[in-house]
């Protein structure tokens, strides 16, 4: 690997500077991505290995991040389980018949992921060969709770109250569905690793709608099953947005790193997560609207606060679609020019 800074930071080694990548870096704000987006619908981009490869490698060539993340979506997994999610342009995910009853949940099945998601594996192999060892490739999946949220709600939501209602009033059906999603996710992440990804990240984008007690019941235990099953095959990063209360339990899960959103101070995150785990984050995505000079100052302060070791610079959530490319370059450049202190 020509640039293995990201892998070294995940192992907790002393590094010359922290690595940097950006959640949702593949797509969204790059003009060349917009051109592909105008030509091909979302899942065509995911299912065509040539397109997924081109989009994955784009930020490596144009932005210079220290890791690539495969262009795909967390919803390809429930698609393979019998839930035919669509992507409505300008609106987001949509499932015409969401899971609303015990019998709906029983119809969801654990597929053969290597067969059903072979296009993901082909995209990984093609991307690895295109990257040619320049930077590591990150594979990913949604957390069982986050996939459950979309499967019950059928679309995005600010609160996911329907998903919570289902979980709280039908706990046994909810747990059996969460377990099927967990089993599929473990097989899926293992298949991604076998196909060549160097690291995996699990996105619990909606763990933060749960109370700390319910988080443990409906999300934490499944996240831990996944980490336990995968951690000996590749480093695992767990990003549980809005779940600062779970940093100490997640830190004991065997994950190599924990992702953080922007609402927590670095010092508090270090204290909650404990000694040796690597932390990743947590620049407010909207702060990339600031000037290049301000971005640089804030990034340097952030690295000072986390410390340059056991740290991966990232945003606290996905990049916003209308961030100017020059500001993204300023963010990455700030990390690369971080002044080494004696
Ligand atoms: O860096 C990357 O962009 C890698 C690929 C990636 C996508 N989605 C592509 C995408 C990744 C890692 C994801 C993860 C994802 N998808 C999450 C977890 C991370 C997070 O943001 O919390 C979630 C919750 C989803 C579900 C999803 N997919 C939503 C809610 C939407 C619509 C709103 C949006 O973010 O645009 C999507 C669509 C989607 N996934 C797009 C992209 C590039 C935009 C649609 C398009 O390009 O046509």
Image (cartoon, helix red, strand yellow):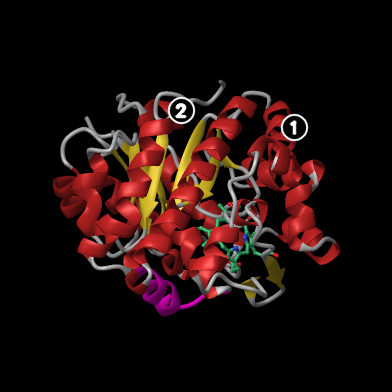
Specify whether residue 247 is in view. Answer: yes
Foreground residue, 246 or 111? Answer: 111
Foreground residue, 41 or 7? Answer: 41
Is 211 drawn above or below residue 10 in the view shown?
Answer: below
Q: Quadrant of the N terminus?
A: top right
Judged from this view, the residue extending furthest toward the top is 1
Is 258 drawn above or below residue 108 in the view shown?
Answer: above
Answer whether labels 2 and 1 touch (C-beta < 8 Å).
no
Residue at the spot of label 2: 234
* Residue 200, image x, y percentages: 49, 38
Look at the numbered disc 1 and give the secondary structure of its residue: helix
Residue drawn at x 63%, y 44% as measured from the top left = 111
Query: What stretch of residues is rendered in magenta?
Result: 155-167
* Residue 69, image x, y percentages: 58, 43
Q: Residues within 10 Å of mark 2 (few under 14, many from 20)?
A: some
Judged from this view, the residue extending furthest toward the front is 103
């Amino acid at each position: 690997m020509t640039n293995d800074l990201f892998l070294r930071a995940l192992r907790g080694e002393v590094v010359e500077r922290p690595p940097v990548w950006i959640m949702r870096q593949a797509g969204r704000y790059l003009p060349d991505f917009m051109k592909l987006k105008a030509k091909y619908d979302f899942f065509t981009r995911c299912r065509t290995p040539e397109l997924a490869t081109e989009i994955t490698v784009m930020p490596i060539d144009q932005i210079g991040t220290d890791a690539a993340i495969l262009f795909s979506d967390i919803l390809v997994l429930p698609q393979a389980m019998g839930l035919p999610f669509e992507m409505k342009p300008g609106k987001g995910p949509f499932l015409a018949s969401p899971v609303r009853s015990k019998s709906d949940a029983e119809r969801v099945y654990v597929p053969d992921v290597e067969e059903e998601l072979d296009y993901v594996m082909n995209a990984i192999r093609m991307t690895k060969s295109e990257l040619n060892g320049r930077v590591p490739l990150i594979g990913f999946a949604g957390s069982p709770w986050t996939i459950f949220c979309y499967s019950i709600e059928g679309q995005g939501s600010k609160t996911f109250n329907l998903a919570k209602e289902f979980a709280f009033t039908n706990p046994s059906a909810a747990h059996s569905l969460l377990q099927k999603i967990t089993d599929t996710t473990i097989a899926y992440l293992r298949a991604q690793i076998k196909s060549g990804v160097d690291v995996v990240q699990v996105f619990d984008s909606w763990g933060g709608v749960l109370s700390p007690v319910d988080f443990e019941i409906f999300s934490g235990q499944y996240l831990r099953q996944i980490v336990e099953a995968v951690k000996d095959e590749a480093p695992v990063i767990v990003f549980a947005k809005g779940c600062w209360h779970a940093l100490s339990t997640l830190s004991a899960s065997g994950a190599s790193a924990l992702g953080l959103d922007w609402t927590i101070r670095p010092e508090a995150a270090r204290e909650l997560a404990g000694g040796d785990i690597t932390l990743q984050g947590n620049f407010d995505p909207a702060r990339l609207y600031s000037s290049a000079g301000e971005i640089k100052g804030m990034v340097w302060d952030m690295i000072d606060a986390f410390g340059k070791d056991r740290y991966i610079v990232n945003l606290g959530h996905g990049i916003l679609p209308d961030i100017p490319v020059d500001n993204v370059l300023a963010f990455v450049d700030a990390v690369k020019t971080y002044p080494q202190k004696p």
